Image: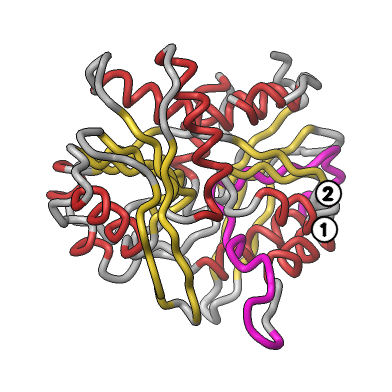
């Protein structure tokens, strides 16, 4: 790969992730300054030329113990604008976790469609392309953004981990925690079935929400005697996941493994996910698991690195290759 006209920056809060992407690409991280002022304002600027270069910014948009999601968003927007003013050739944001992606439709009177407003902000400061990992609703994301979007799929990360730990002839069922996630679960079922060389059954939970509250839930599908793999895009408080796991164990499931791209882990997630009904949890490193205890992380949670996906995406985009294989992998 000709990296002479490529530069990759990692903003505060996502620099370790960016360093791993840079290492996978075999390039150094771009040098930049992030200066915080006493009144809470800040300044970000590149410390090297980006004129006419293929420029990438890494920022995972979630709150951590240093910066809120909104602070990260403002820093990212200002960075894009600054790079545009510095004559960067093309600006691409690598956002392992995209904030506000779940608010993609009106569910109450006068509800906001926040992902559309987010897209307008990115486009207003000059973003050319956005790369995200397992966004909540792909169609809504693609419709919201007018700039280019690329969607990375973590399915093979899950499959590699499962094949390394499961028995070859183990009875498996793939489950979606709600009907809305059936396409995601079906996609994963196809990937896992192909790797195993046998077709796997699919199940799902009936679920309805109103004003943030889970109203009903019923397991649809046969899981008796099987290891159930629950597939979702993210885990927040873990309540939905635990409800599905309990329904599976009540219906005779032998084990329950959850796999989700984003371990947001908020609220009482540490207590909820410690429940015996959940045997293992697979997540990527798109979000730091700050809420979870070290004991729970060691005992039950497996972090899978998504940096290889982003490095491959950067390489493909820089060399003008199609990313279809990455999206469908």
Provide the secondary structure element on which disc 2 rests: loop
- The quadrant of the rendering that contains the C terminus is top right
| Left-right relation of 39 to 251 | right
Along the line of sight, the residue nearer the viewer: 308 or 111:
111
Q: Quadrant of residue 224?
A: top left
Q: Earlier in the sequence, mark 1 or mark 2?
A: 1
| Left-right relation of 155 to 148 | left
The alpha-carbon separation of the residues under discs 1 and 2 comes to 7 Å
Coordinates of residue 208 in the picture (x, y in percent)? 48, 69
Which range of residues does the magenta coloring cover? 81-110
Coordinates of residue 35 in the picture (x, y in percent)? 57, 62
Q: Are marks 1 and 2 in contact (CB under 8 Å)?
A: yes
Look at the image and name its color scheme.
Answer: secondary structure
The image shows residue 311, relative to residue 302, as above or below, that is above
| Left-right relation of 120 to 156 | right
Majority SS type along the magenta span: loop
Q: Which mark is residue 147?
A: 2
The image shows residue 227, relative to residue 115, as above or below, that is above
How many numbered markers are drawn? 2
The residue depicted at 68 percent of the width and 47 percent of the height is: 46
Along the line of sight, the residue nearer the viewer: 136 or 60:
136
Q: Quadrant of residue 304?
A: top left
Provide the secondary structure element on which disc 1 rests: helix
The image shows residue 190, relative to residue 47, as above or below, that is above
- The quadrant of the rendering that contains the N terminus is top right
The residue depicted at 57 percent of the width and 50 percent of the height is: 59
Q: Which residue is mark 1?
A: 123
The residue depicted at 63 percent of the width and 53 percent of the height is: 137
Question: Is 103 one of the magenta-colored residues?
Answer: yes
Along the line of sight, the residue nearer the viewer: 243 or 219:
219
């Amino acid at each position: 790969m000709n990296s002479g006209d490529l530069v990759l920056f990692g903003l505060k809060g996502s620099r370790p992730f960016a360093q791993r992407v840079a290492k996978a690409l075999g390039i150094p991280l771009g040098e930049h300054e992030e200066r915080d002022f006493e009144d809470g304002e800040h300044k970000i600027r590149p410390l090297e030329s980006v004129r006419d270069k293929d420029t990438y910014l890494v920022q995972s948009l979630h709150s951590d113990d240093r910066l809120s999601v909104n602070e990260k968003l403002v820093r990212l927007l200002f960075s894009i604008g600054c790079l545009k003013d510095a004559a960067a050739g093309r600006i691409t944001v690598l956002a392992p976790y995209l904030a506000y992606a779940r608010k993609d439709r009106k569910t109450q009177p006068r509800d906001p469609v926040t992902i559309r407003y987010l897209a307008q902000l990115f486009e207003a400061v000059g973003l050319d392309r956005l790369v995200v990992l397992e966004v909540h609703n792909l169609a809504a994301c693609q419709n919201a953004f007018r700039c280019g979007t690329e969607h990375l799929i973590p399915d093979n990360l899950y499959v590699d981990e499962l094949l390394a730990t499961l028995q070859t002839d183990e009875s498996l069922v793939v489950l979606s925690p709600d009907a809305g996630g059936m396409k995601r679960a079906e996609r994963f079922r196809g990937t896992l079935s192909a790797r195993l060389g046998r077709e796997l059954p699919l199940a799902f939970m009936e679920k309805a929400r109103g004003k943030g509250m889970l109203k009903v839930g019923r397991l649809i599908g046969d899981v008796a005697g099987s290891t159930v793999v629950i597939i979702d895009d993210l885990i927040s408080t873990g309540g939905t996941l635990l409800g599905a796991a309990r329904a599976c164990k009540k219906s005779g499931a032998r084990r329950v493994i959850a796999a989700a791209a984003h371990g947001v882990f908020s609220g009482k997630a540490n207590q909820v996910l410690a429940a015996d009904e959940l045997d293992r949890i697979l997540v990527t490193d798109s979000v730091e698991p700050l809420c979870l205890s070290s004991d729970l992380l060691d005992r039950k949670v497996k972090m899978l690195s998504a940096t290889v996906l982003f490095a491959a995406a950067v390489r493909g985009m820089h060399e003008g290759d199609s990313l279809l294989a990455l999206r469908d992998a």
